[in-house]
Amino acid sequence: MAKKPVPQARRRVHVRLTDLEGAAMAEIARSGEATSYAVARSFANSPSEFWSGSVGAVYPLIQRLARRKLLAASAGSTGKRARTDYCLTRAGQAALRDWLLDTERAAGLGFDPLRIRLVHLDQVSRSERQAFLKGVNERVQAFAEREVWPEDPRLRAIHATVVAARLGWIAAVSAVVEDHE
Amino acid sequence: MAKKPVPQARRRVHVRLTDLEGAAMAEIARSGEATSYAVARSFANSPSEFWSGSVGAVYPLIQRLARRKLLAASAGSTGKRARTDYCLTRAGQAALRDWLLDTERAAGLGFDPLRIRLVHLDQVSRSERQAFLKGVNERVQAFAEREVWPEDPRLRAIHATVVAARLGWIAAVSAVVEDHE
DNA sequence: CAGAGCATGTAAGAAGTTACATGATTGT
DNA sequence: ACAATCATGTAACTTCTTACATGCTCTG
């Protein structure tokens, strides 16, 4: 049954970036050229707590991407301090686009620390649920008022929609989980 | 990232569960008693794609929890097949409550594969952005219509609010990112 | 009674976290 | 000039993923 592998009219899917890799590539692309340290710092400044933004994560990641020829390294210096700058290769630009415009992955739910708790919130009493949701709501309110990315109106606008949507969802879901006691 | 809040006058925080550990504990608590395999399967059946739900992740995790005395193991069998059941110890119940009702962690943003892309979506053309958001919207719509957890109306209701909130957010954010071209 | 798929794991490796190390620069 | 902090990393450890192994149970 020797079977010819049908040569699909296949799109050239070069490399599949993880989300952390994609985010790092996008940061570098934005600056044109950046050091690992700069990338790590930009993660650390983002309002999401999900990635630690530790250099210990970012340096090996950048090295990986360079090894795969998605980034090109160039030695530089600031005064006496040596530095390694990275910029995207052509293959890197293609990989970044594939990652950025991947609707399938973008449509996924990702990970939400509230959602996962809601699923199990029927295991506590009604009054505990109410107190919990009230507490979460207050914290998200506080988070909404915190200034993030003060220098970038575009990111602030996105962040505002995120928080607004979250508050709306909390209100909606509160009704649901209190019904089902 | 503003790190480490001051070490508060110590509440009796027994153990700090990770989110994956918390979810596993909650699953076991729900059944009263469960095997590692059953926990892994329940993850695999959840509509979130974030955790692989592979047994290779769950078995060591459960063993860890047992070693920390949060779970108690008991040998059982189904016919000839041996089995290890786990149930929560008293310390485990306390740890689960601490995890489940942790408003601080629940209020966090978690990880969202769309949000992270939106941040960098100014790097592509307006028409690509529009096509991308249209694609994502369609996929989330499709996801909304998929039947999940057919056996549990409570979970279905929660899931419905999640998807509805997501669709609302996509609409809101679409306006924002198309403005800022 | 043979094959499919269920239940129970183990092993190797990748990826991220915390902690540490070290020299350069900057503020006072 | 001394301390603080920035910039640049490395190392050890933990946790998840993918892939494999193996024996049961069920179904046609």
Image (spheres, coloured by chain):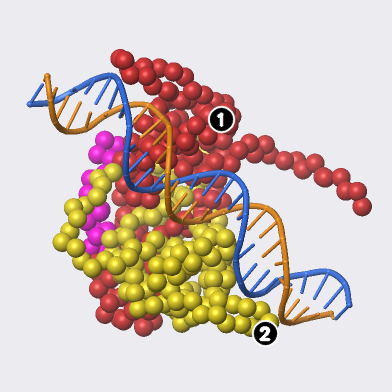
Chain colours: A red, B yellow, C blue, D orange
Position in image of residue B97 (x %, y %): 33, 73
Decide: is A55 above or below B136: above
Position in image of residue C3 (x %, y %): 83, 69
The magenta stretch spans which residues?
A: A136-156
> Given the image, what chain letter belongs to the residue carrying mark 2?
B
Disc 1 vs disc 2: Cβ atoms closer than 8 Å?
A: no
Q: Residues within 10 Å of mark 1 (few under 14, many from 20)?
A: few
Position in image of residue A157 (x %, y %): 32, 45
Query: Which type of secondary structure does the marked residue at label 1 adopt?
Result: helix
Position in image of residue A78 (x %, y %): 32, 17
- The residue to which callout 2 is attached is B79
- The residue to which callout 1 is attached is A67
> Given the image, what chain letter belongs to the residue carrying mark 1?
A
- Name the kind of residue labelled 1 in the image: Arg
Q: Residues within 10 Å of mark 2 (few under 14, many from 20)?
A: few
Quadrant in the picture for the N terminus of chain B: top left
- Name the kind of residue labelled 2 in the image: Gly
Residue A153 magenta-highlighted: yes
